[in-house]
Image (cartoon, rainbow, N blue to C red):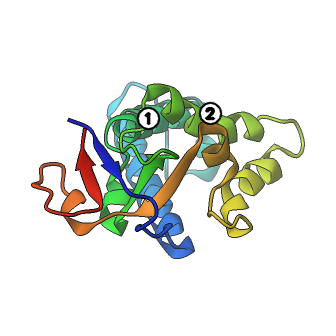
Amino acid sequence: MRKVVNLETLEFSSYSQRIAARLIDNILCFGLIYLFLSLSDINIDFTDPQAFYDSLGSWVLFLPLFYLAYEVPVTASRGMTIGKRIMGICVVRTDGLIGIGLDRALIRFCVPMLAGLIPVIGLLVYLGAQLWFFYDPQRQNIADKAARTFVVRVPKDLRTPYHNSQNDDVIDI
């Protein structure tokens, strides 16, 4: 059963909530990729800076794949990564449906990544696309605009994966 939130009664997420959620998710993904590369046959010496720099290709290849596997499925189905759940925010469609679907989750993931691939200015374009929500009245970044989503503060009863909603802001469909 999917949930629909009444966007008129909910607040958009704060800047600090979005940034903290992204930091939590990044730390988690970096930790997972570190663990994966440490346990794999890929020989990376994390203590030697030159050896680490020489093996940076492994990070460049695996980090986006791990982040894709981490973020897209949970955002598509529940609208919340672990970082978003901790910070009490959720990704919803512009019609209020929680669980934005695989297509919109992929758009939210791919837009900034593709912007980052632009030669020479890619990092600046990536950061600009991610930080656009500072200038947007609905606090959407470029990926949110492309996917037609919002990031909102979630009622407390939706922060856990299994809940009984008694909130008027949430409707089962």
Give the left or right position of residue 50, taking residue 28 as reference.
right
144, 55: nearer the viewer: 144
Looking at the image, residue 168 lies above or below residue 105? below
Classify the position of the C terminus by image quarter. Answer: top left
For image coordinates 57% across by 39% down, the residue present is 108
For image coordinates 52% across by 75% down, the residue present is 16
Residue 95: percent from left, percent from top: 48, 44
Give amino acid for label 2. Answer: Cys
Identify the image quadrant of residue 159: bottom left
Q: Looking at the image, do the residues carrying marks 2 and 1 touch, with CB atoms under 8 Å apart?
A: no
Residue corresponding to mark 2: 110
Residue 21: percent from left, percent from top: 44, 62
For image coordinates 49% across by 43% down, the residue present is 45
* Whether residue 47 can be seen here: yes
Residue 106: percent from left, percent from top: 53, 30
What kind of element bears circle 1?
A: helix
How far is disc 2 from disc 1 in space, using C-alphas?
Answer: 10 Å
Classify the position of the N terminus by image quarter. Answer: top left
What kind of element bears circle 2?
A: helix
134, 12: nearer the viewer: 12
For image coordinates 23% across by 68% down, the residue present is 156
Give amino acid for label 1. Answer: Val
* Whether residue 59 can be seen here: no
Give the left or right position of residue 147, taking residue 86 as reference.
right
Question: What residue occupies the far left of the structure in this picture?
Answer: 164
Identify the image quadrant of residue 101: top left
Looking at the image, residue 38 lies above or below residue 137? above
Residue corresponding to mark 1: 72
